[in-house]
Image (tube, rainbow, N blue to C red):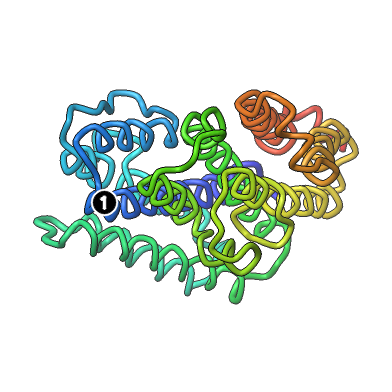
Amino acid sequence: MLSRVADSLYWMSRYLERAEHTARLLDVNLNLMLDESQTSSEHRWQRVLHALGNPQDVEWVGDPYLLTRTLSYDLNHKPSIVSCIVSARENSRHVREQISTEQWHQLNSLYLHVTRPGLQIETEEFLQLVMDSIHQFQGITDSTMSHGEGWQFIQVGRFIERAAATAMLLEAYHEDLWINSERIPESNEYLEWMGLLRSATAFEAYCKVYTADLTPDRILEFLLLDKQFPHSLRFSIDVMQNALDAIQHESGKTRAESLHRLGGRLHAMLSFSSIDDILRQDIVGVLHNIQVQCRAIHNTIYELYVDYPIQTALAG
C-alpha cells in the first residue's frame, strides 16, 4: 500500500475517534451540571481539559458553555470537534478510491452538516449527532470495506487513539478516585464515578459485570484490563496489535520486529497484570507509560509505513 494512502486512512480514523471522544466528554459533563456547585463545576471542567490532553490555546475561564462551544465548533482550534471532522473528511478525500461509496457518503454528509453556514442546533443535539454519525461510519466501514490492509490501518488509527484517550481519561480522574480512595464516598462522588464510566461508554457494561456497586478499584480494573469491553485499554491494544500483525503479514515487511515488540510489550503488560499488581504501583506512572508507549508505536508505524526511505522500500 502507498504510504500516502496508509497515512490518510490512519489519520481519518484517528480524527473521527477523537471527535467522538470529545463529543462524549462534553455531553456527559453538560449533563452532570444539573447537580453541582460552583466549586465542583470548575474542578470538573478543568478535568475535562486534562482528559483531552490540555489542548493548546484552550483555557477554562469559568464558563462551561463557552468552553463547550470552543471545543465543539471553533475551527481556529485544531482539537475542536468540527476541526477533527474537517481533517477526517480531507484525509478521506485523498483516498476516495480506497474507501466504499457508503463510507464517503456518511462522512461527507456529517461534514456538510456541521460546517453548514449559520448552523442552528442545540449543543446537546449537535454532540449526539456527531456521536451517532461516527458510530454509523464505523459500522459502515466494517460492513462495506474489504478487511484488507487499508481496513487494518483504519483499525490501528481508531484503537491507538482510543487507548491513549482512555489512559488520559483515567489519569485525569486519578486524584479523585485513587489518591483519596480510602475515604467514605460522598453522594456526589458516585455521580463523578458514573461520569467517568459514561465518558468511556462503560456504565451499563460495568454494571453487567459488577452490578451497580461503583468502587474506584473495580472501575480501574474494568477500564484497564477487561478483555471484552471495546473501550478498555486491554481490548484496544489487543485489536491494535492484531491489526499491526495483519498489516505486517500483508505488506511483507521484514523490518517490523521493533513494532511487533513495542505492541507486544504493551499487550503483555495489560494481559498478564492483575489489578492488585497495578494498584501497588504508581497509577499515574502506569497510565503515563501507556501513553508514552502509544506514541512510540505511532512513531514506529510512521518509520515503517509512511516516512520510510525509498531504499528501505526497495529492500523489502
Q: In terms of image quadrants, where is residue 208?
A: bottom right
Q: Position of residue 234 (x, y in %)?
A: 71, 49
Q: Position of residue 110 (x, y in %)?
A: 33, 63
The C terminus - image quarter: top right
Q: Position of residue 203 (x, y in %)?
A: 51, 61
Which residue, given by chain and number where applicable, does mark 1 sit on?
A: 30
Label tally? 1
Query: Left or right: where does residue 297 sit relative to residue 109?
Result: right
Picture residue at 37% right of the left edge, 37% below the top: 48
Q: Nearer the viewer, residue 289 or 120?
A: 289
In the rendered view, tell whether residue 10 sits above or below residue 254: below
In the rendered view, tell whether residue 164 sits above or below residue 155: above
Query: Left or right: where does residue 259 sit relative to residue 62?
Result: right
Q: Return the residue found at the far front.
A: 184
Would you call the spot at circle 1 few (<14 residues within 10 Å), some (14-19), or many (20 or more)?
some
Q: Amino acid at mark 1?
A: Leu
Query: Left or right: where does residue 117 sit relative to residue 292?
Result: left
Q: Nearer the viewer, residue 54 or 157?
A: 54
Picture residue at 58% right of the left edge, 38% below the top: 167
Q: Nearer the viewer, residue 36 or 139?
A: 36
Picture residue at 51% right of the left edge, 35% below the top: 183
SS at circle 1: helix
Residue 32 can be seen in this image: yes
Residue 90 can be seen in this image: no
Q: Nearer the viewer, residue 315 or 216?
A: 216
Q: Position of residue 139 (x, y in %)?
A: 54, 71
